[in-house]
Amino acid sequence: MSIFTRSGNTFINQRPGEQTILVTRKHWIKLFIPMFFIALFVLIPFVTYFFISETAWYQNYASLYRFASAVYFLILWNIAFYNIMIYTLNTITITNKRIIENEQRGFFHHNTDEIPLRNIEDSSVRTFGLLATFLRYGSIEIQSAGATNIFHFKYVPNPQRIKRIIAEYVSYVKSRRYSYRP
């Protein structure tokens, strides 16, 4: 399979007969908070310039100030890129057979966990705080019968809807498994 195949419904290690039901990322607030602070830090060289541009010594060190500002902006750009990359690559994929969590923890640190739907015993939603209630995000905990007992997904958008989708597919998979007689 070519790496240039473009499809919103396929992913690496997709099994035969497996269909993607839902792909979601963490809530946008998880990206907004660091980007807000980065935007505030972008203002620092401009505010500093406003105060020091009229001083006598600034004329002697203007080139150094511009160089330091350029390095500062480069560092901020890298921090912004890192946050956007982490937000974009962290996904939860729900298929008709399993739930897959792709967690990018750094540039070279990636973790993938999966739960077969037939192993899910219970799921619960937790929403903490006023902001989480109004913006409709929270955590989903899934208890499974596998080696890892509890899977915890944080900052999930619309957790009640996602829990309902998971419950529907879990009940469908379990009803098919128990009603099948060879």
Image (cartoon, rainbow, N blue to C red):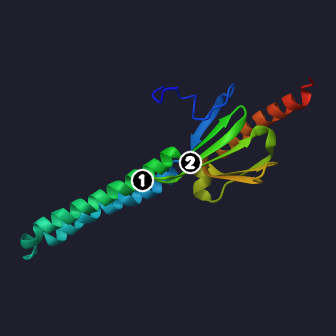
- Disc 1 is placed on an element classified as helix
Q: Where is residue 64 in the image (x, y as percent from the top left)?
A: 15, 68
Q: Mark 2 points at which residue?
A: 26
Distance between the alpha carbons at the discs numbered 2 and 1: 15 Å
Three-letter amino acid code of the residue under disc 2: Lys
Rate crowding at label 2 as few (under 14), some (14 to 19) or many (20 or more) other CA atoms within 10 Å: many
* Label annotation for residue 82: 1
What's the residue type where badge 1 is placed?
Tyr
Horizontally, residue 147 falls left or right of residue 50, namely right
Q: In this image, 15 relative to 62: left or right? A: right
Mark 1 Cα-neighbour bin, 10 Å: few <14, some 14–19, many ≥20: some
Q: Earlier in the sequence, mark 2 or mark 1?
A: 2
* Vertical relation: 64 (above or below) 129: below
Residue 24 visible, this orientation: yes
Q: Which quarter of the figure has residue 11?
A: top right
The residue drawn where x is 93% and y is 25% is 181
- Name the residue: 62% across, 60% down: 129
